[in-house]
Amino acid sequence: PPKWCRIDSDAAIQWFPLVDPLPDVLPLNTAGRCTCGVIASLDTPTRLLPCTIFGSHRSYSRMIEVRQCAACTLGKKFAGPDLRELGLFNFNNRSIYTHELLNAFTSSMTAHELPFHAFATTVDRSYMEHGSPSTFVSDETFRRVWYTFRRVQILGDSFECKDCGPNPPCVIFDGLTAGIPASKLTSTLAPPTKIVPDAPVRHSVR
């Protein structure tokens, strides 16, 4: 998880800050894994492919070391490096994203309302200001990248208040980061602010 939202139980999980400057060639230090799930053979020779690294303020052109995947049809796919030790997320060997960029969306989304489109637009404008050699990706592409990154992160369901500990007597949720699909609406679903007749009365809470 991002460093800002870690609790004591996350201390053993390694954190990977962005390496600066980034190497000209992103190395393949292991056999490499293809998007189809197959681990490439170490006997397969490596080759270099051009790739684009997307950061918060600009993109960078680099080369990435890969191995051809024998399991994929016509060998059109390649097994590439993980790159987490560089603070990078390898989406598809061609498009690489910095952890800092992806965690920035997580931080902003949890602090205030922020659609993917608004975030992608803001980053794209920053690319223009910093003279980036390429524009930022579309909000649809960034949405796929962020959810893919989210799935490989170690994010548990543990929560803890710095003052009250892991089990506070009262928790107040203010706002929603995502709407409820219409297909999930039922007659028993109500906003959290609705007062019901048998609701507990907490005199210590204003």
Image (spheres, rainbow, N blue to C red):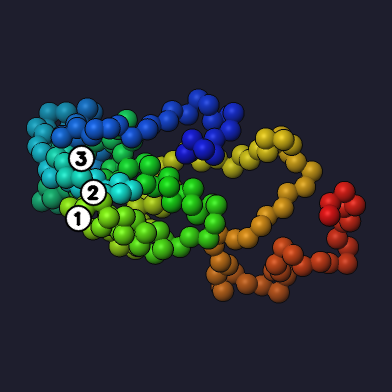
Which residue of the protein is positioned furthest toward the front in this rendering?
Answer: 129
- Image location (x, y in percent) of residue 116: 41, 61
- Image location (x, y in percent) of residue 32: 23, 35
Q: Which residue is mark 2?
A: 59
Q: Residue at x 33, y 35 (%)?
A: 18
Whether residue 206 is visible here, answered yes or no, is yes
Q: Residue at x 43, y 51 (%)?
A: 105
Relative placement, left or right, of 48 versus 201 is: left
Label 2, label 3: how far apart the Cα atoms are? 23 Å
Q: Earlier in the sequence, mark 1 or mark 3?
A: 3
Q: Quadrant of the C terminus?
A: bottom right
Relative placement, left or right, of 140 versus 171 is: left
Q: Nearer the viewer, residue 72 or 175?
A: 175
Mark 3: amino acid: Ala
Q: Residues within 10 Å of mark 3 (few under 14, many from 20)?
A: many
- Image location (x, y in percent) of residue 100: 38, 42
Mark 1: amino acid: Ser
Q: Which residue is mark 1?
A: 134
Label 2, label 1: how far apart the Cα atoms are? 6 Å
Q: Which residue is mark 3?
A: 79
